[in-house]
Structure formats: C-alpha cells, structure tokens
Image: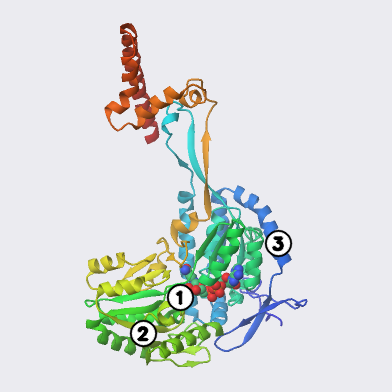
Amino acid sequence: MKQTTSAPNGNGEAPLLNTKDETGGRTEIPFTNPATGEQFGSVLEATAEEVAKARREMGAAAAVWSAKPLQERVRILRKLQGVIVDSLDEMTVVINKDHGKSRQEALIELFMTLEKLQLYFAKAPEWLVSRRVPRGLTSILSLSRQYYTEVMPYGVVAVIGPWNYPFELVVPAVCSALLAGNTVLVKPSEVSAATGVMIENLFKRVPELSPFVRFLHGGPTVGAAIVQAQPDLIFLTGSVRTGQIVAQAAAERMIPFLCELGGKDPMIVLDDADILSAARECVWGGAAFNTGQSCVAVERVYVVKEVYDQFLDAVISEAKKQSIGYSPDTNNPYHMGPLTFERQKNIIAEHLQDAQEKGARIAYGGTIDGLFMEPTVVVDVDHTMKLMKEETFGPVIPIMKVDDELHAIQLANDSKFGLGAYVWSRNEDRAQRVAQQLQVGVVNVNDVLVNYAVPDLAFGGVKLSGNARTHGREEVMQFTQPRSWSVGPPPLPFDPLTMIRQPNRYGMIKAMTQFFFGVTAQQRLQPATEAFEESTTVRKAGIMAVTAAAAASLATLLALFRKKARQ
Ligand code: NAD
C-alpha cells in the first residue's frame, strides 16, 4: 500500500504525511479513518536493525545535544513550538482522520501541548539548575570546599506513546526529555500511526532538532525491540498490561522505567451536590469528550441514595442531548465521534455483556453502529462486574447507588487503579475531606478533567496507574538524574576530614560524635569532663584554657559558615 501523496503546505514545506512508494516486503501499518473506514496511507514498521541503529546513533548524538547550553536547547525547541503554531490546521486534519475525534478536540490537544511547552521552555532555566548543598559537620572547617548537586540527562530516552491523545501524550514528554539534555527514541502508537508520522515530519521542519530525535513506527514488536536496545530510560504511556510487560523487560536490563497507565476513575456524588452540573459534567467527562477514551474519564459513579433517582434522570437527560457523528470540517456539529478502533469496541461490548449477565441494566443507550456508540448509562451494577473493576475506555457510565459517603469512599478505593477521582458537593470542605481519603494521584472537586488542562499541576497516578508524572516541573525533572559534586583545594593537615583519615583517632571521633549529636549538655561535654577528671591540677588549667579557646573558635567558625551559607 502506498501513502497518499499530499501537496506541500502553504510555506512550501514537505507535507506532514509524505509519500512512500515501496514496501520492500516489509510490514506496513495502514492509516485508517475509523469513521469512514477509508485507508489513507501507511507507514513501514521499523525493523530490529533500524531500532538498534537508531539507538546507537542517538547514543552518539546525546553527547552533542547535552553539551549545548540549556538556553541553546530552549532556543531550538522554541522553533518547534513555532512550527506547531504554524501547522495547526494541517495537524487537525491528520488527527481528525487518524483518530476520529473532531478537529476542535484535536485543536484542544494542540492547545494543551503548546501551553505546556511554553511553560517548560520559560521555566527550564529555573528548574534545571545546580543546587548548593550545606557542608556536613565533619567538613565544617574546610570552608573553601563547595558541595552541590546538578541535574544531568539520562542519555537516550525511549518515549512509547498511546493512541487516545496521540499528540499531547507524546510531544510534551519528548520535549521534556530533550530539554533535560537527552536524545529521544519515539515510538508512537500503531493505532494512530498517521499522527506519529505527522509528528516526525514536524520535527524534521526544525533541522537543528531532528538529529537528536528518532521516530520508530510500529506496534508491540517495535516497542519490545526498543526496550531490548537498552535505552537509558523508558517512558511509557499505555495500558497496565503493556506496563507490566515493559516493566519486566526493563527490570531484566536494569533500565529505569516511568509509566502512565490506565485508570478507572470514580465520581462520587454526595447528597448536597449540584446535581444538574454533576450530571452534565459526568456525561461530558465520561462519555462525550474523546468518546470516553481518556485515562481520566469518569469510569464509574457512586451516588448517595438520597439523590440517586434525581441524578440518574439528569444523566439520562444529558446523554439524550449528545449528537454522534463525524465531520472533517473545522465546524463539526457533533458532540461525539467514533471509537478509534475495533479492539476498543470489543472491550466495551465484553464489559457490557458481563455486566448484563450479572444483573446490570442499560438505562440509556447501548447501541453501537460501526464504531459509533451512544452514550450508555448502566445501572444495578456492582463490584463483581468488569464494568466496575476493569478499564472500559468508552462512552459508558455505570452508576451505583450507595448508602453514604463512607460507602462511596470504600467502593472508590476498591480498585487496582489510582489515577483520578471526582467528588461533588456544594460544601467544598466536605468534598475535600472525602477526596482526601481516596487512593488516587489526582482529585477534582466539583468538576471533571479540568486539572489536566493546568500545565503546571502535576498529573499521574498511584497503584497500577503508574509511577510517572506529567505536567510542570515534575514532568521535566523526571528526565534528569542528580550528579553530586565536591570541589575545592587539597585538604589541609588540620581539617577534621584529614585528621580522621589517620589511625588512632577513635577518641577524637567519639568526642566529636558526642559533641555534635548529644541531646543534653552533659552528653555534649562528656569528653571534656572525662579528660578533666583524669588530669592533674596543672593540666586541668590547660584543658580549661584550650576548651574555652576551641569553643570560641568553633562558635566563630559556625557563625561564619552560617553567614556564608545564607549568601
Ligand atoms: P497499549 O498498552 O496498547 O499501547 C501503548 C504503547 O505501548 C503503544 O505504542 C504500543 O505499541 C506499545 N507496546 C505494546 N506492547 C509493547 C511491548 N511489549 N513492548 C513495548 N511497547 C509496547 O495502550 P493504548 O491502547 O495505546 O493506550 C490506551 C491506554 O493508555 C489506556 O489504558 C489508557 O488509560 C492509558 N493511558 C494512560 C494515560 C495516563 O496518563 N495515565 C494517558 C493516556 C492513556
């Protein structure tokens, strides 16, 4: 299969989806529009040799990239920001075709990416700095010696991405890794392969940047080959199952592994909640936005019995308002697009069937036409059902009646996932008190998903939802590791650190230990007291004089040291 040929864009630059004429018998990944079934191109899957070669090349390039001053890296990365801003319409065309989401939702993805990049580029000089470290007690007398930690890159970072936000979940991570001085191997998802090729071509539009990033297209085999090629750090966004496989392979090779995995986010509706708002946002965040295919979508709802009927009616009434369809235009009239691919549809169907077999009832929706699915409200659910325990990742909202807030908290925490949670109450203190007890990495009170749009608010999960953080300082810093420095002239013979290197210093070290760490005056002065008691009158006078002089000198040095440390 050939990729469709596109004309150059308005700037005369190569199109974001380029033409390939030959497959050479290699595996092709088709680009498929989920809404229409149209195949609009393909990309060749990377071979194991290409992966190994890319790893070697990025290893060599890492020294060149990390040697560039931070301001220079920022300058180059800002060019990519400019290219993205210049290519918004071109990109929303590709994402819309590739994923099925509307061009408006694709644009929201680009907006969120750009806001993060802008923040990271501005803050990097503040975040990626060396930090002076106070001297330890034993080196208190070597004032000319400095101790500090600096942040250094890992080397080659592998970024393996998912399909649900194929741009926003790849580009900020790649840019953060680059900002920190790493080179990057990128494997976009095979499900959104056209977007992956598009991102590759965006990077190529910045010739100063493209030698430091290598794109490897393909599915699990390519991902596994990347892990085998021994990158210095792996950052994966994907399912728990893939996370477990990659974690195991990484552990065998002792490769540090960061992951953002699945979620099963609970929404708790308390008796004093604004029911209409809660219902509206539940449908938007659980079904409509990205057709429910978000790691932080509302995946299960617990409503206290007093307001259960009212909430259910309001959710069904909101669900009825959602229009479903696909348009390639910027002005798309639909609330919800298609599911992105067949596998997702099968998972949803399996969860619904399992729930219905165990007594659940579809209160609204349930029909699937091709990949278009109605927002689906399910009731009479319980925790024996996959629908309440496994990630469904579609426009399905299971709603469970609970006795009270404690019951809701218990059920919300009865999950292997721990990404986000939503609590609704007009009493914000009460909502926060409830949210405090939830085992999750992200909490939203009286709204859904909005936390994700805040570029400086760390995002990530606990439990099986992963160990990484995106957004803000946390995202950038996880691509660095500290290197510690001790710098100064050679030690002097009377430095404590020099003296304790000699044999027969037990008494001296013990005296220092007692002096510095004693919790009572008696403990601190014990060595002096012992020496004093064992001495003759003449020596006692000498010891008193020496002790007074030593205490005065130590006090002066400590004052000097504190003054210097404050500067
Ligand atoms: P997935 O696990 O199927 O694939 C993710 C990536 O891993 C793909 O690029 C895939 O090719 C690659 N991969 C698969 N097997 C591999 C292997 N053995 N070795 C190396 N790489 C391998 O996930 P997906 O379906 O693409 O994405 C959806 C999942 O991602 C959902 O579970 C969703 O919750 C999760 N997700 C999490 C976050 C978050 O921030 N926590 C964000 C978005 C999506």
| Label 2 packing within 10 angstroms: few (<14), some (14-19), many (20+) | many
Along the horizontal axis of the image, is 142 left or right of 528? right
* Rendered residue at 53%/62% (across/down): 173
Along the horizontal axis of the image, is 446 left or right of 167? left
Residue holding disc 2: 381
Q: Residue furthest right?
A: 24
Along the horizontal axis of the image, is 107 left or right of 23? left
Label 1 C-beta lies within 8 Å of the nearest ligand 1 atom: yes
Choose mark 2 or mark 1, whichever is in front. Answer: 2
State which image quarter holds ligand 1. bottom right
Please say if 138 is above or below 7: above
Instruction: Say what amino acid the circle numbered 1 marks.
Output: Ser
* Rendered residue at 29%/89% (across/down): 313
Q: CA distance from mark 2 to mark 3?
A: 49 Å
Tell me the element at label 1: loop
Q: CA distance from mark 3 to mark 1?
A: 33 Å
Q: Position of residue 527 (x, y in %)?
A: 35, 22
Closer to the chain start, of discs 2 and 3, is 3
Residue holding disc 3: 52
Image quarter in which the C terminus is found: top left
| Label 1 packing within 10 angstroms: few (<14), some (14-19), many (20+) | many
Please say if 389 is above or below 78: below
Which image quadrant is residue 32 in?
Answer: bottom right
Label 3 C-beta lies within 8 Å of the nearest ligand 1 atom: no
Q: Which mark is residue 294?
A: 1
Please say if 166 is above or below 515: below
511 vs 474, nearest the viewer: 511
Q: CA distance from mark 2 to mark 1?
A: 21 Å
Q: Is residue 12 visible?
A: no
Instruction: Say what amino acid the circle numbered 2 marks.
Output: Val
Closer to the chain start, of discs 2 and 1, is 1
Q: Position of residue 463 (x, y in %)?
A: 43, 65
